[in-house]
Image (cartoon, coloured by chain):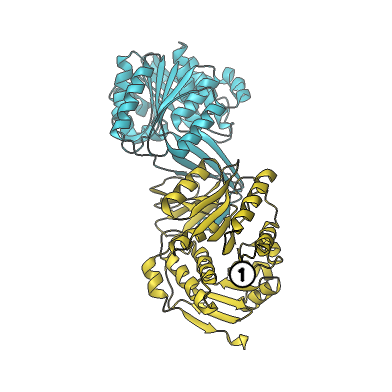
Chain colours: A yellow, B cyan
Amino acid sequence: MILTVTLNAALDITYRVPRLCPHTTHRVTEVTERPGGKGLNVARVLAALGHRTIATGFAGGGTGAALRALLAQESDVTDALVPVGGATRRTVAVVDETSGDTTQLNEPGPTVSPAEWDTFLGAYRELLGDARAVALCGSLPPGVPVDVYARLTRAARTAGVPVLLDTSGEPLRRGLAARPDLAKPNADELAALTGSTEPLRAARDTRRRGAHAVAASLGADGMLAVTADGIWQAAPPRRIAGNPTGAGDSAVAGLLSGLVEGLPWPDRLTRAVALSAATVRAPAAGEFDTETYEELLPRVVVTDHPSAA
Amino acid sequence: MILTVTLNAALDITYRVPRLCPHTTHRVTEVTERPGGKGLNVARVLAALGHRTIATGFAGGGTGAALRALLAQESDVTDALVPVGGATRRTVAVVDETSGDTTQLNEPGPTVSPAEWDTFLGAYRELLGDARAVALCGSLPPGVPVDVYARLTRAARTAGVPVLLDTSGEPLRRGLAARPDLAKPNADELAALTGSTEPLRAARDTRRRGAHAVAASLGADGMLAVTADGIWQAAPPRRIAGNPTGAGDSAVAGLLSGLVEGLPWPDRLTRAVALSAATVRAPAAGEFDTETYEELLPRVVVTDHPSAA
């Protein structure tokens, strides 16, 4: 099975309003709720691709119960979330129906106690025993040590399980030093980490910081992979319009499923880019439009990067 | 005891953000949750004043469970909410810490089935048997008939229980026709109902539509009561700065406790205005600042309205 870790899972709530006007009162016309947090989005896409997938991390309170009920109801992901005393955070996305734009409000998440953190570490090590790969995803809730991804990466490497790391800021910087098999930053995260807005330079720098390979998601430009075997850029055949939320998480699912299936790099990137674009066409993160995915799969353009020569 | 009815109870969530910028992502710095909905605010203030208070209406889902837990934890209100299959709505107040302004997002609420509605009516009639007064408050969830407040008013009058009605729009219009003892519109509701922005004219018109008495809340101008015994205006001694959310609900609690205690109209208005102003100084609806309340109580200015002569 494939294991995904979501330390700061979320109940994702979407509100549609006719028009968002700050400092006034709005009647919300439509409310939708979904299991959220990067690792859970990755898990849902992996499960939809047919991979046996287990999701761990923390969940608690009424919002945690709602999240777990939705996860059970809407996916084949096995729930191995560790109970926590605090309540799982909510994220609220307010969609302005006039402009189509979204305003996002993200709660910080529950404070995790040292005892809860210990319980999680035990559960994580046990789950690694059966894992073919693990994805470490997203931001940290209060109370979790900032070098958590370094610790989780080392535990996975000790167990011989390949690690994909998808986070940002200090947790990314620290995590890279533990030498994960693959890091998947986006353009903003690359720039924040390395100070360079030139993707190839930044991805190479990221690799030097410890990741065995770096696959950077570059929005409409697709993905750039810098690996020991070469450098590739994969791009969708055309610009896909829609909601980009979760596109990066679907790319992680594409990369990880390709790794587990032993696909060569260009095929992993093709899958990641097609899934990512198909997610832009789906209503929410953790979902993808099957038709778009199948249509794009043979059409993604992969180029050997000239500077690899 | 005093009974309050909240058909569309809410879990009130407040988010503080450094600055609200539409179409961007915000980290919420502070999250607070409180039991919400006008009737529950009224009940909490009544209980804080020492009145035995029972709250009924509907509650359901994880949000309903959270609401009930908070109500039990934070007040002496007896919970007689009727379970409903759908989830209690959330309201989200986003406080911009730079400007101090609030942007409000209100969910519509759960759809109430005919069977749930019947169960509620039975519970309501039973509770009336022990009630000295009843407050019918707030908006309606989907599925509840628009003439609901007329029905609930008639049932209370049949049981000999005085009725205070605090709602707006069509439910107010229909409710007035059933002759409640007291209606408490605010200036906007009066204007929407009668087409007049002149409070005295509008309050008199509202009384002609069926209410035995009308006590209109006029924000910083206090309250205007048009009754069979006379017309009074009550005003705080000075402008009170703060958050006006829930000020009208506290006024309802003041009026209703005064009615039950047999106070004369000027004393009821004094209490309503002092409570209302003390709520402006409290962090949330359903709460009031005791010191401000006690300081204002002897200082509210009540005037016999000249046009009553």
Quadrant of the rendered structure where residue B307 is?
Answer: top left
The image shows residue B299, relative to residue A81, as above or below, that is above
Q: Is residue A153 left or right of residue B40?
A: right
Quadrant of the rendered structure where residue B16 is?
Answer: top right
The local secondary structure at tag 1 comes to strand
The quadrant in which the C terminus of chain A is found is: bottom right
Q: Give coordinates of residue B179: x percent, y percent.
A: 30, 21
Residue B167 in sight here: yes
Q: Give coordinates of residue B263: x percent, y percent.
A: 47, 12
Q: Give coordinates of residue B117: x percent, y percent.
A: 31, 30
The residue at the far front in this view is: A129
How many discs mark residues in the rendered view? 1
Q: Please state which of residues A191 and A20 is positioned toward the viewer in this rendering.
A: A191
The image shows residue B183, relative to residue B194, as above or below, that is above
The residue at the far bottom in this view is: A309
Indicate the amino acid at tag 1. Leu
| x 58%, y 87%: residue | A306
The residue at the far top in this view is: B262
The image shows residue A123, relative to residue A239, as above or below, that is above
Crowd rating for badge 1 (residues with CA inside 10 Å; few <14, some 14–19, many 20+): many
Residue B307 in sight here: no
Q: Give coordinates of residue B62: x percent, y percent.
A: 47, 39
Q: Please state which of residues B152 and B127 is positioned toward the viewer in this rendering.
A: B127
Q: Please state which of residues B87 and B13 is positioned toward the viewer in this rendering.
A: B87
Q: Chain of mark 1?
A: A
Residue for badge 1: A182
Q: Please state which of residues B7 and B216 is positioned toward the viewer in this rendering.
A: B7
Q: Is residue B80 left or right of residue A182?
A: left
